[in-house]
Amino acid sequence: LSEGLFDAVLARGGAREAVSDGAWLQAMLDVEAALARACADVGVIPASHAEAIAGACRAELFDVAAIGAEAANVGNPAEPLVRALRAHVGQPAADDVHRGATSQDVVDTAAMLVARAALGALLHDLRGAASAAATLAADHRDTVMIGRTLMQQAVPTTFGLKAAGWLVALDESAVRLADVRLAAQLGGAAGTLAALGDAGVEVLGRFARELGLDEPVVPWHTDRTRVGELAGALGEACGAVAKIAGDVVLLAQTEVGEVREGVEGRGGSSAMAHKRNPVAAISALAAARQAPGLVATLLASMEHEHERAAGAWHAEWPALRSLLTFTGSAAAWLRDCLENLEVDVERMRGNVGDASVSVGAASELVDRALRAHGER
Amino acid sequence: LSEGLFDAVLARGGAREAVSDGAWLQAMLDVEAALARACADVGVIPASHAEAIAGACRAELFDVAAIGAEAANVGNPAEPLVRALRAHVGQPAADDVHRGATSQDVVDTAAMLVARAALGALLHDLRGAASAAATLAADHRDTVMIGRTLMQQAVPTTFGLKAAGWLVALDESAVRLADVRLAAQLGGAAGTLAALGDAGVEVLGRFARELGLDEPVVPWHTDRTRVGELAGALGEACGAVAKIAGDVVLLAQTEVGEVREGVEGRGGSSAMAHKRNPVAAISALAAARQAPGLVATLLASMEHEHERAAGAWHAEWPALRSLLTFTGSAAAWLRDCLENLEVDVERMRGNVGDASVSVGAASELVDRALRAHGER
Amino acid sequence: LSEGLFDAVLARGGAREAVSDGAWLQAMLDVEAALARACADVGVIPASHAEAIAGACRAELFDVAAIGAEAANVGNPAEPLVRALRAHVGQPAADDVHRGATSQDVVDTAAMLVARAALGALLHDLRGAASAAATLAADHRDTVMIGRTLMQQAVPTTFGLKAAGWLVALDESAVRLADVRLAAQLGGAAGTLAALGDAGVEVLGRFARELGLDEPVVPWHTDRTRVGELAGALGEACGAVAKIAGDVVLLAQTEVGEVREGVEGRGGSSAMAHKRNPVAAISALAAARQAPGLVATLLASMEHEHERAAGAWHAEWPALRSLLTFTGSAAAWLRDCLENLEVDVERMRGNVGDASVSVGAASELVDRALRAHGER
Amino acid sequence: LSEGLFDAVLARGGAREAVSDGAWLQAMLDVEAALARACADVGVIPASHAEAIAGACRAELFDVAAIGAEAANVGNPAEPLVRALRAHVGQPAADDVHRGATSQDVVDTAAMLVARAALGALLHDLRGAASAAATLAADHRDTVMIGRTLMQQAVPTTFGLKAAGWLVALDESAVRLADVRLAAQLGGAAGTLAALGDAGVEVLGRFARELGLDEPVVPWHTDRTRVGELAGALGEACGAVAKIAGDVVLLAQTEVGEVREGVEGRGGSSAMAHKRNPVAAISALAAARQAPGLVATLLASMEHEHERAAGAWHAEWPALRSLLTFTGSAAAWLRDCLENLEVDVERMRGNVGDASVSVGAASELVDRALRAHGER
C-alpha cells in the first residue's frame, strides 16, 4: 500500500490497509472459498471441487486493475472476479465456483469481512486511546484545574475527571463498535436461495460459520440496517474522538497552556520557534469530522429498491471505505496524542486562581470510571 | 397541540406531541421534582421542601412563552424556569429548588425523558408496522411474484419473502431503538457534583432511579455518545422505513400494479379519477429522508468543548426534536400503509410470466422471520 | 406567531415569521390570485372572475388547521386550499380558480415567495452584521493583536484585518444569496401547460411577472437546481456566520479576554458573577450548525422522479423552512453580537507581548475591504 | 494513475486524475513558481532566482511518498515540499523559495488550481451530457409518452419535454459551476502579507494573475465562502445528474421499457439473458449520491478558527477531492448514458393508452429549451 500525499495526515492507522483494494480482493475470494466449502459440506458440490476452488482463492493470483476495469461493464467487481477465478480453477471444478450466489452476496459478505478487519484495527487504537486516558485520569486524579463552561472559566474541577470523561466516552463507543452485528449474506439472484435447491438454508448457516459471521434470519441484501448500525457506531466513535481532540487543542492554546503534545520533532514551526502545534489532535479532528457526512450518505443509501438496489447499493462502497479509514485515522491520532500528552500541573493550578478549591466528588467519579474501564 | 399546515403530512404519530414545548416543560419540571426528592432522600434538603417543590412542578402553572422569551438572556430555558419555579414554591423551600444542579443537567435529563416518551410513541407505530408486515408475510407466504434486481425483472420470489425482509428490518431497528441507553445527567456547574458535598454520587444514583433512567458512570454533560447512539438508531429506523415505503411506491406504479393503498377517500385525484396515489408510503418517505441530515447534525454536534459546549450543546435541541418527530411520522405512516395494503395476487402471478417458478427456500425463510418475530 | 420554549434562542429574526404557516398560506393564495390575473390578462378567464378570485385570496378567510388536516388525504395542503378557495369564491368564478394549475405549481411557487420574504429578512440582518463588521474594521484598523494559527499565538496582525475578513465573508455570502434565482413554477398536471391550451406559455410569463419572480425556460417541477442553489447559498452564509461567531467565542475566553458581548442583563451567571457568556455568538453557532445537515437533505431531495416526485418533493418543505429559519437566526444573532461587541484594545496589545510588531499590509487590506463594502 | 477495484464504476472521467496526488504535487509547485515570478516582478527577489525556482517546480523531481510521510510531522504536505524544493534549487536561490508565504497559501491556492482542472474535466462531461439531452429533446420533440406523477400514470407529455427538462437542469448547473469564484490565496504566517514588506498587496495581485485566478479583496485563509460555494455548486450538479439518471432507471424498468442503454457488452447478465441493466445510470446515481454528505462536510468545515484552523482546514482536503471525483464520475456516466440511450417510441406511445392525447405547449417548451441551450 503506497503512501499518498495526504495519507500520513488523514489516513493513519491500520484501517486504511484493511479497506484497501488488496484487502477487498482477498475478502471476496475468502467469500468464494467459504461458499465452496459450505456447499461441499452439505453435498451440493464435491469436496474435491471445494478444495480446488479454495486453493485458488489467493489475491496474488489476480490482477486488481484488470478486474476493476471490467467491473464497469456490470457495475461491480465480483462478476469479473468470478470469471477470473473460474479460469484459474479450471474444469471440472470451475462450474462449481460461486455456486448459488450472486455478485451482491460476494460484495456484501466481503464488505462485512473488510469491516471486521478494519474494526479490529481501529478498536486496537481506540482502546489504546482509552488506556492512555485511563492513565491520565489515574495520574491526575487529584490535579486541580479550572472548569470551563461556554468557554468561560467557571468553578474548579480536576484534570483527572476530565480525562475520566474522555475515558468513559471512548470505552462506551468501543463497546458499541464491538457489538455491531456483522452477518454473512447469501441469497442468490433474488435472495431466495433458489439455486441451492433444498440445501439453501443449510448452506447459508455453514457459510456464515465458515467466515465467523452471524447467520441472518433471512438474506439481508436489501435490508441495510446492518450497514446503518455500523455507520452510526463509527460516527459515534468519531464524535467521541472529536470532543477529546478538541479539548486538547483548546487546552494547548498559548493562553491556556495546560497541555502540549510531546513528540520530538513534530508540531514545531520553522518560522516560529516558540510554537508547538498539537498536530495529533488536529489530525484526529480532521479525520473525525469526515464522519457525519459519510454517515448521512450511508443512511440515505439504505433505501434499496426491490431485490437489488440500482445505485444505493453501489453508493455504499466508497462511503463505507472512507468512514472506516477516517475513524481509524481519528483513533490512531488520538491514541498518539493522549499517549504523548504533557500536562502542566503548575499551569493548571495557576489558572484556578484564588478561588477556593472544592472539587466535590471528582475523585470519586474518577475511581468509578477507572473501575468501569477495568471491568470491560 | 395545534395542527399546522404541513403537520398531518409530515408530523404524524405520537412523537410530535411527545417533543412539544409542553412536554419539554413538564419534563424539565419532572427533573426538578426528582432532584428535590433525591436530595431529600439523602438528607441534603428537608423532605417538606422536596414535597413543596414537587407539588409545584406542574406545567400548567408556567407560561411557556414567558420562559422562552427570557431564555434568550442566558441561552437556555432552564434558568428562567428555575426562577419561575422558585417563585411558585416560595420560601423557605425556594432555596432548595435546583439544588446542586446546573441548567444543563435539567435540559439534558429532560431531553432523555422527552426522548423516552417519543421513542415509546414511535416504537408503538414501528412495532405496529412490523405486525402488519408479519401478517403480509404470513398471508402471502406462497404468493409468487417476480424478483427485481437493478429495477429489472429477474427470477421469481414470493411476496411473503419480500414482506419477511421488511419484517426483519423493522424488528431489528426496533430492538436497536429499545436498547438505546438513556441516562440521567447531574453534575452541577462543572460536572463535579461539588455543590452536593459528600452526597453527590448518592444523589446522582437516586435521581436516576427516581426518573427510571440509567445512572451514568460519570456525568455525561460533554460526553455525547448517548445522543450519538440515539441519533444513529433513529437514522437506522428511518432507513428501514424508507426501503419499505420505497418498495410500496414502486410496486404501486401503474405499470406494475401489484399493490395499492386501500384507504377510502385518500390518494384519489379529482382531475384523474383512475389514479390512486400511495399517500402513506410517500409521506413515510418524506419524513424518513429528513433523518440522514439530522443525524449528521447531531453527530457533528458531539464536539462539546470543555465542561459545557458553546453552541454544540444548543445545536442538539432542534435537531433531536426534529429527528424524533420525523422518525415517528415515518413509522406512523408506514404502519398505516402496511395495515391497509391491498395486494393484487393475480397481477403478481401475471408479472412472473411463463418463467418456470422456483422460489427456493423462500417459504422456509418466511417461517424463520415469523418465528424470530414471535420470539421478540 | 407565538413564542415557543426554544425560539428566542434558536429562531431569532424575521425569517421565522416569513416561513410560518400563516405566511405559507398567504403565499399560496397570492399564487392563486396571480394565476387568475394572468389567465384573465390573456383572456383564458373573465376579468371579473379573476377579480372575485383575487378578492378571496386573503389568509384570514381560511382555517389553517382544517386545511392542514385535510392535506393528509392527498399529501399536500394546496388541494384542500383550492377547494376552500372555490367555496369562498362561489359560482360562477369558482370553476376558474386554480385554472390550468396543479397542486405542485402552487406549493413550489409559494415556496419561492416564502423564500424571497425570508431572504429579505435574513439579508437585512446579514447586511447589518456586515455593517457592524465594517465599523469594527474601521475603528480598529490599526489595533494590533496577536495572530493565532492552529490555536497557537503566531505573529501580530490587527483586529481591523480580522474584522475585515469577517466583512468580506459576510458581503460575499450576501451577494450570493441575493443572486439566487427564484422563479415561478406553472406547468399543470404533467408540466406541459396542456390545460391552458395555446395560451400556456403566455400565461406562464404573465404569472411570473405578476409575482415578480423569474420566468423559467421550462416548468421546473422536477428540476430542483433552484432549490439546490438556494440551499447551497444558505449553507454558505451559515458557514460565514459560524466562522465569525466562533472567533468571538474564542476571543471571549477568560484566558484571552480580548472581546466581550456588551448587552446589559444578558450572559451573566447567577452562580458565577464574574462570568459573562457570549450568548449571541453561542446562539449564532447553534443555528448556523443546523445548516450542513439541512443542505444535505435538500440536495439529496433533488432526485425527483418523472413528472412529480413521490416523497422527494414533500421532503423539501420542512428542510427548507428550517434552513431559512436557522440562517435567519444565525444572522440576527451575529448582528446583535457584532453590534454590541466590546473590544479590549489593551488586552489585545498585551497579548502581542514583546514581539516586535510588524503588521505588514494589514491596514491596506482593511481599506480594500471597506472600499469593496462601500461599493456594494 | 493505476485503476483500482472500484474506480471504473465509481471514479470515471477526468476529474479523478485532476485531483490525484501527482496533480496536487504539480499544483503546489505551480504555486511556488508563480510566487517566485510575482516576487521577482516587483523586485522582492532577483529574476534569476525566480527562474531557478520555477525551473525546479516539476513534479517528476519529487518523491510523493517521502513528502507525504513527512507531512505527518507538521500536518500538511506543503512544508516538506518547500524543504525539498529548496534542496533542488540550491543556494543562493533556495532562500527565496516560498518567499512571504505560509503552507496554507500553497495548499489553498493549489486546491483552487486542482479544482479548476477538475471542473474543466467534469464540465466537459456535463456539457456532453447536456448536448446528448439536447439531441434527445430535438429528436423526440413530438414523441408522445405518458406523464407520471407520484409514480402513477397521469396525463400525456412528450419525451422531448422530459429531455428538455433534463437539458435545462444540466445547462443551469454547468453555468453555476463555471461561475464559481476561484481565487489565489496569499497572506503569509497570519494573513497580513507582512513578510513581503510594502510589496505585499502588489505581489498578491501579480501572483493571482500568474495563475489565472481571481485576486481576492483580502486573503481568504479563514474565509471559506469560496469552498462553500464550490461545494454547493458541485452538490447542485450532482442533484441534477441524479434526477436524470433516476428517470432513466425508472423508464428502463422491465414493466415500463421505454428506454434502454445501448452499449454492446455492458449491462448483460450471464445468468439472465433477457436482462439489460442500465449500468451507466446506476453508476451515475452511485456517484451523485455521495455529494450531499460531502457538501455537508465542507460546509461544516467552514468554521475556521482565528488565522488558521486547527482541523477544519485539513478536513477540507479529502472531502473536496472526493466531491470533485464523484461529481466528475456522475457527469461522465450520465453523458455515456444519454449518448447511448435507445428510446422505444412505440412502447411510449403504447403506454399512453387510449387517452386522448393533448400535450399542450410541450413542443413550444422544447424549442425554448433548445434555444436557451444554443445561446449558452
Image (cartoon, coloured by chain):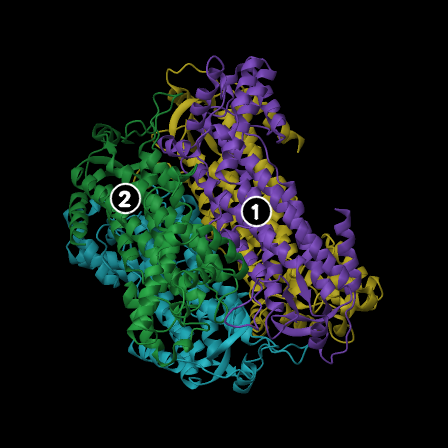
Chain colours: A green, B cyan, C yellow, D purple
Furthest residue toward front? A91
Q: Position of residue D228 (x, y in %)?
A: 54, 42
Seen at 18% across and 59% down, the residue is B47
- Looking at the image, residue B110 sits to the left or right of residue B217; the answer is right
Q: Please state which of residues D6 and B283 is positioned toward the viewer in this rendering.
A: D6
Q: Please state which of residues D286 and A272 is positioned toward the viewer in this rendering.
A: D286
Q: Are marks 1 and 2 on the same chain?
A: no
Furthest residue toward right? C43
When the figure is inspected, residue C356 is found, relative to residue B372, above or below; the finding is above
Q: Quadrant of residue B269?
A: bottom right
Q: Please state which of residues D360 and B21 is positioned toward the viewer in this rendering.
A: D360
Mark 1, residue position: D232
Seen at 35% across and 31% down, the residue is D73
The chain under label 1 reads D
Q: Position of residue C268 (x, y in %)?
A: 37, 39
Mark 2, residue position: B189
Marks 1 and 2 sit apart, C-alpha to C-alpha, by 41 Å
Residue C287 seen by the camera: yes
Q: Mark 1: few, some, or many residues within 10 Å (few <14, many ≥20)?
A: many
Which label sits in the foreground, 1 or 2? 1
- Residue type highlighted by circle 1: Gly
Seen at 42% across and 64% down, the residue is A86
